[in-house]
Amino acid sequence: LEDIIEEIVGEIADEHDIDMQGVKQEADGSVVVDGTVSIRDLNRALDWDLPDEEATTIAGLVIHETQLIPDEKQAFTFHGKRFVVMKRDKNRIARLRIRPAGEI
């Protein structure tokens, strides 16, 4: 219903919307995140507890945990989350999809 109303009147903000540059909440519950987003900001915005001692960005965390620069569509599970690389630009992760580890 919200989608239909938004088509008529424009975007409607609600309690589930995330107002953060480089972060988009998807209808399926996953979150699409630019690789440059800081772990600390992501933790605050989404009430997560990802570690930020070894890396400052979400892409850096994935690279640190996997010990490689993953290819597009590669998926990894750690820290209670499932990370899927959506876009890679040369030697950097440009975009990720993140969801709770128990979800498909």
Image: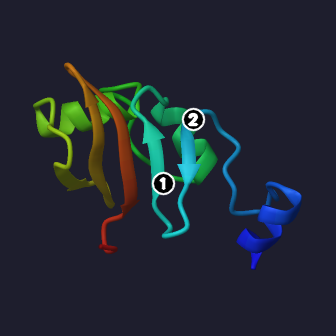
User: Residue at the location (65% across, 38% down)?
Assistant: 20
Give the camera-side residue of 47 and 3. Answer: 3
Furthest-front residue in view? 8
Earlier-in-chain disc, 2 versus 1: 1
User: Residue at the location (20% across, 19% down)?
Assistant: 91
Q: Quadrant of the C terminus?
A: bottom left
Horizontal relation, residue 99 to residue 92: left or right: right
Helix, strand or loop at disc 2?
A: helix
Place of residue 96 in the rendered image (x, y in percent of width and height, measured from the top left): 36, 43
Place of residue 42 in the rendered image (x, y in percent of width and height, measured from the top left): 53, 41
Marks 2 and 1 sit apart, C-alpha to C-alpha, by 14 Å
Which kind of residue does numbered mark 1 sit on?
Val
Residue, disc 1? 31
Mark number displayed over residue 41: 2
Horizontal relation, residue 13 to residue 59: left or right: right
Give the camera-side residue of 41 and 71. Answer: 71
Place of residue 43 in the rendered image (x, y in percent of width and height, measured from the top left): 53, 44
Horizontal relation, residue 80 to residue 26: left or right: left
Furthest-top residue in view? 91
Dot 1 crowding, Cα within 10 Å, few <14, some 14–19, many 20+: some
